[in-house]
Amino acid sequence: MAIERVDLIMETVSAIISFSVAYYSMKAFKITQNRSLMYLYYGFSILGACMLTRVIATTYIVALARSLEAKTRILVSTASLIYGAMRTASYALFVLAYITRAGGEPKLETAIIAPIILNPYFEFIEVALLIYVVAQSAINFIELKNANSLLIFSGFTLILISHLAFMYSIIMKPVYVLAHILQLLGFTSMLIMLLRVGR
Amino acid sequence: MKLKKKYRSRIQIIADILSVIEDEGGKTGVTRILYGANLSYDRLMKYLSELIDGGLIRKSEENNKSVYILTKKGYEFLREFRKIKKFAEAFGIRI
């Protein structure tokens, strides 16, 4: 139970940070009307909502598990499906933010993303989308060479590694907590960037 | 060799105009803004008129010359724009 509590706390903190980034993206979008910022806003909002949904669902399922085993199994699979779909959608929006940042119309790559949201192998899709996002943030860091772009690059990289750890935790349970720590560190990196920008 | 033309968004042009006025101590004439913001006279006059309507700058007469003064709202806009620009750039988004 102690481990579950820790992972829920970490996920709640990550969700709050995600909402903060979403709020700042929305503020920036309102002033600039830049579509990439709008996609960032939707992406981080969905990601935050997705993590909070998982926290609420897990708390409810853990409480219910003692009494109704069959019902719990249905709930777990439903919650996993919603969680995976939301997370995949948020990463797809980040990819869209990078694709549209030049100001043009979304290219063919965008059309490929939409149907795979329905694919059941969410973790693999999320990792694939995140690899693209990490690569783009790395290119940006190489171009700018400043602390803020480094923080975003390391943020997305840590979230990507956390996904790989989540996948590995299926066969090795202790890695699950490490995955949450990595995810929290990723969001903390983004929070530091927000604090630096807002100074 | 063909030089790549750098696209400047509307919001960036507005920020450039306000920055020129700020750099000149918060008050300057049209010629300085023309050079600093790198715009044609007609386009600049359109922008200046929009900025006056938006309350970001105000026009005044000094020694029979028009000067444009950055308002408190203009300073606040510039401060906010710079933060937003840093934020967007961290994600690789140019505004």
Image: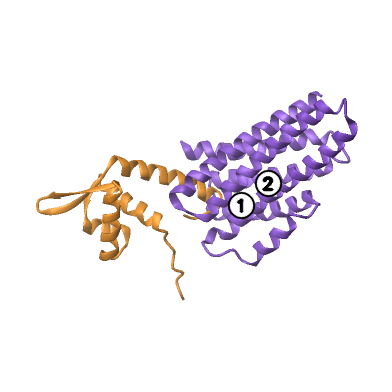
Chain colours: A purple, B orange
Is residue B7 visible in this depiction of the protein?
A: yes
Residue B63 vs residue A131: left or right? left
Q: Amino acid at mark 2?
A: Thr
Q: Nearer the viewer, residue B9 or A56?
A: A56
Residue A93 vs residue B74: left or right? right
Residue at the outermost bottom position: B1
Q: Amino acid at mark 1?
A: Ser
Residue at the outermost left position: B63
Identify the residue at image location x=75%, y=46%: A84
Q: Quadrant of residue A178?
A: top right
The picture places residue A53, in percent across and down from the top left corner, at 70, 37
Q: Residues within 10 Å of mark 2 (few under 14, many from 20)?
A: many
Mark positioned earlier in the residue sequence (2 or 1): 1
The picture places residue A38, in percent across and down from the top left corner, at 54, 51
Asked if labels 1 and 2 touch by Cβ distance under 8 angstroms, the answer is: yes
Q: Residues within 10 Å of mark 1 (few under 14, many from 20)?
A: many
Does dot 2 land on a helix, a strand or a loop?
helix
Residue A32 vs residue A87: left or right? left
Image quadrant holding the N terminus of chain A, namely: top right
Q: How many marks?
A: 2
Is residue B85 visible in this depiction of the protein?
A: no
The picture places residue B84, in percent across and down from the top left corner, at 46, 46
- The chain holding disc 2 is A
Q: Quadrant of residue A57?
A: top right
Gap in Å between the C-alphas at discs 2 and 1?
Answer: 9 Å
Does dot 1 land on a helix, a strand or a loop?
helix
- The chain holding disc 1 is A
Q: Nearer the viewer, residue B89 or B74?
A: B74
The picture places residue B73, in percent across and down from the top left corner, at 32, 42
Residue designated by label 2: A157
Residue designated by label 1: A137
Q: Nearer the viewer, residue A176 or A32?
A: A32
